């Protein structure tokens, strides 16, 4: 699931996110039911990443970004804002946003980033069973993994163990 939050009446990203074939939870920051809906989505284990579309209230959107990163540090956030200062972009990225786009932006590049985040989340959930532990009798067939230098095996294990921690 993708969480899309906007602080204005018109949301320009909704149609772009529907193209990636994932459920999109769409929340308007100024709706009266925003807080309970936000808490429900944040508690959902299927949440892949969030997109904050901010046009009017940068301070409230930054607070929201901080809330997301505090509650779910594993959820990457894409921040989209109206053209502003470099300070606002720096503040957004230093607050934990994975990417920051300013309007108008390249939709193809945005979609590439969305697909990349979905791929990263899918890979981090994937758990692989070591070849040698599947069938102890098949040890002769597993010589490819056994012939690898120890440093490469340690590197592969390190990457698999720590990939999901760096979202």
Image (cartoon, rainbow, N blue to C red):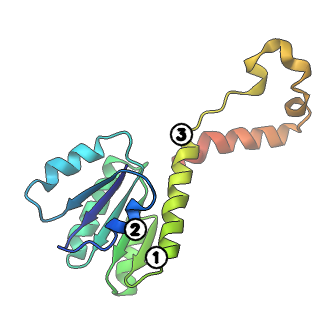
Image marks 1 and 2: residues in contact by CB distance under 8 Å: yes
Asked where in the image residue 24 lies, by quadrant, the reply is bottom left
Q: Secondary structure at mark 3?
A: helix
Circle 1 crowding by C-alpha within 10 Å: few under 14, some 14–19, many from 20:
few
Spatial distance from mark 1 to mark 2, Cα to Cα? 8 Å
Where's residue 160, x and y in %?
65, 41
Where's residue 80, x and y in %?
36, 73
The numbered mark, 1 or 2, whose residue comes first in the sequence reads 2
Where's residue 90, x and y in %?
41, 77
Q: Nearer the viewer, mark 1 or mark 3?
A: 1
Spatial distance from mark 3 to mark 2, Cα to Cα? 25 Å
Circle 2 crowding by C-alpha within 10 Å: few under 14, some 14–19, many from 20:
few
- Residue drawn at x 23%, y 72% as measured from the top left: 59
The numbered mark, 1 or 3, whose residue comes first in the sequence reads 1
Residue hosting label 1: 107
Where's residue 12, x and y in %?
31, 74
Spatial distance from mark 1 to mark 3, Cα to Cα? 27 Å
**22 or 136, which is in the foreground?**
22
Residue hosting label 3: 125
- Residue drawn at x 88%, y 37% as measured from the top left: 148
Asked where in the image residue 86 lies, by quadrant, the reply is bottom left
């Amino acid at each position: 699931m993708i969480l899309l939050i906007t602080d204005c009446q018109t949301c320009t990203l909704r149609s772009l996110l529907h193209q990636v074939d994932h459920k999109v939870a769409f929340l308007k920051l100024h709706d009266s039911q925003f807080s309970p809906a936000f808490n429900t989505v944040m508690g959902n284990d299927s949440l892949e990443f969030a997109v904050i579309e901010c046009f009017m209230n940068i301070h409230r959107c930054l607070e929201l970004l901080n809330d997301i990163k505090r509650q779910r540090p594993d959820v990457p956030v894409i921040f989209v804002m109206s053209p502003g200062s470099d300070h606002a972009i720096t503040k957004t990225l230093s607050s934990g946003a994975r990417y920051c786009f300013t309007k108008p932006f390249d939709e193809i590049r945005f979609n590439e980033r969305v697909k990349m985040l979905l791929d990263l989340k899918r890979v981090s959930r994937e758990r692989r069973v070591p070849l040698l532990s599947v069938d102890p009798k098949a040890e002769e067939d597993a010589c490819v993994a056994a012939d690898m230098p120890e440093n490469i095996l340690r590197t592969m294990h390190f990457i698999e163990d720590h990939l999901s921690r760096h979202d």
